[in-house]
Image (cartoon, helix red, strand yellow):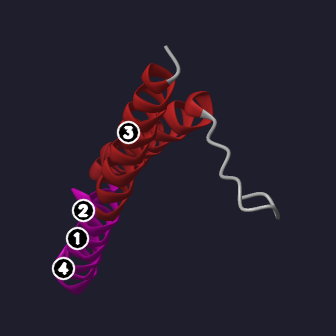
Amino acid sequence: MAGDGVLLVNFGALQQASADINKGVSTLQSQLDQLERDAAPLISEWDGEAKEAYYVRQETWRKASAELTQILQNIKGAVDRASEDYLTTEKQATQRFQ
């Protein structure tokens, strides 16, 4: 918002933010999947407490990842709705002058 009470909206920036959030979620999941694939051969050789501790930690980061993904999807939804609302408002304002 400019100091004069004018709100400037960059539709391209809103669309890019939405795409960036999607990319971030995808990258996060991809990296976690790769970590699990890389660790699998090592874990298969573990026994007892070490193996159990890994699986407990794995479940913790899976839950954290799911929570973060949900938060990011909520933010993306808000960005998308804001973009749509601003675009609708701009179209309505434009029609008033036609």
For disc 3, the marked residue is: 26
> As drawn, is 7 to the left or to the right of 33?
right
Q: Does the residue at mark 4 contact the one at mark 3 (Cβ under 8 Å)? A: no
Q: Main secondary structure of the magenta part?
A: helix
Quarter holding the N terminus is bottom right
The outermost residue toward the front is 97
Q: Residues within 10 Å of mark 4 (few under 14, many from 20)?
A: few
Sequence-wise, the earlier of marks 4 and 3 is 3
Which residue lies at the image location 36% right of the left edge and 36% below the top edge? 84
Residue type at mark 4? Glu
Which is closer to the viewer, label 4 or label 1? 1
Residue type at mark 2? Ala
For disc 1, the marked residue is: 63
Q: Is residue 76 magenta?
A: no
Residue stretch in magenta: 42-70
Q: Quadrant of residue 16?
A: top right
Q: Does the residue at mark 1 contact the one at mark 2 (Cβ under 8 Å)? A: yes
Q: Residues within 10 Å of mark 3 (few under 14, many from 20)?
A: few
Q: Does the residue at mark 3 contact the one at mark 1 (Cβ under 8 Å)? A: no
Q: CA distance from mark 4 to mark 3?
A: 28 Å
For disc 2, the marked residue is: 66
Residue type at mark 1? Lys
Q: Which mark is residue 52?
A: 4
